[in-house]
Amino acid sequence: MLGFKPLEYRQTANTIVILDQTQLPEKEMYKHLKTVDDVYEAIKSMKLRGAPLIGIAAAYGIVLTAHSNELESILKAADYLESARPTAVNLSWAIKRMKDVAAKSKNLFEGLLKEAQAIEQEDRSACQYIGQYGSELVKAHAKIMVHCNAGALATAGIGTALGIIYTAESQNKNPVVYACETRPLLQGARLTSWELTKNRIKTYVISDNMAATYMPEMDLAIVGADCIALNGDTANKIGTRGLAIIARYNNVPFYVAAPLSTFDFSIETGADIPIEMRSEDELRKFNNKKIVADRAGIYNPAFDITPADLISGIVTEKGIIERPDRTKIERLKNSGLNKYL
Ligand code: MRU
């Protein structure tokens, strides 16, 4: 299924080929990234986006510099890439893995390429497991509300939240998706509708302010995550917190789907998760046309925090943490299942 690849590293040309997500759904355009600057720019401008995918892109971005076999310049490139987006912990997590390997590799290119491939492969496999576990939550013909894009466009595999939907579809459950458009960059309208319909999943796009109207009809809401704190508080695309509140009011189960690479056990609560503030132009203009009065101020945080007590469960590749809290997440942390904890 799927029929597209958001990112591919080509070793012979030492190039990363990405599907430029800013052009979707209008054009399926691929871009060749040859330098660390290209990768930084692509992450920053969200030509590629989604927490797991930016971690994978940064890992291969470091590989692009590795032919020099100069540790210092490789570490400098790693720090530069890490500064591209601050909230998605998968980015710093992947970069730490690459730096650790760089510090102990004799042949830097070989060592770093192997590690980037491992990060990519682990993410692909995590998505499969998340899909399997999460699909148990989906009954036949379930109506499911989603936000932003936590799909194949955001990972190396079938996606997290959307991976659950693809898996449920493969079990002939015929889920119906209500995708919030996700202002201001419209990942729900542009990207989620594109990849779901390409894969023949019944999809309706609603504007963000329709969520409260349609939520009472839903069987489930599932979102992705950019960072999960030790107590289960979760950072995800701006608007997620509002959806969780609406879901709770309507007794609709609200699940987060994320791999272990999205947990940051050193962050105690959501209050300590850094929130990316993006350019005010993303709100001030629409289709390059001014839509806000010049003298009005603008707030544009890219993410918000959903408190753990609004989350019914977190679907990971190791299973589902029902009603997440610090004790359960500490148990996950100490289980030794992930060598990079
Ligand atoms: O700003 P974006 O488009 O990178 O935000 C993406 C999200 O919020 C996703 O829900 C999250 O990264 C999980 S992707 C599997």
Image (cartoon, helix red, strand yellow):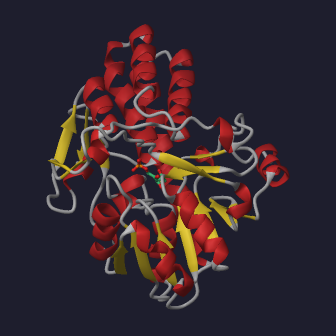
Q: Quadrant of residue 323?
A: bottom right
Using the rendered image of the protein, determine whether residue 112 is visible from the camera's viewpoint: yes
Residue 162 sits above or below residue 87 on the image: below
Q: Nearer the viewer, residue 306 or 11?
A: 306
Q: Residue furthest front?
A: 295
Q: Residue 107: percent from the left, percent from the top?
A: 44, 18
Q: Nearer the viewer, residue 319 or 115?
A: 319
Q: Residue furthest right?
A: 327
Quarter of the figure with the C terminus: top right
Q: Residue 162: percent from the left, percent from the top?
A: 46, 67
In the displayed structure image, the side of residue 30 where residue 198 appears, left or right: right
Q: Which residue occupies 58% across, 56% down?
A: 258
Q: Residue 292: percent from the left, percent from the top?
A: 26, 48
Q: Quadrant of residue 133?
A: bottom right
Q: Nearer the viewer, residue 92 or 287?
A: 287
Q: Residue 231: percent from the left, percent from the top?
A: 76, 48
Using the rendered image of the protein, determine whether residue 129 is visible from the camera's viewpoint: no
Q: Nearer the viewer, residue 156 or 121?
A: 156
In the displayed structure image, the side of residue 264 where residue 10 appears, left or right: left
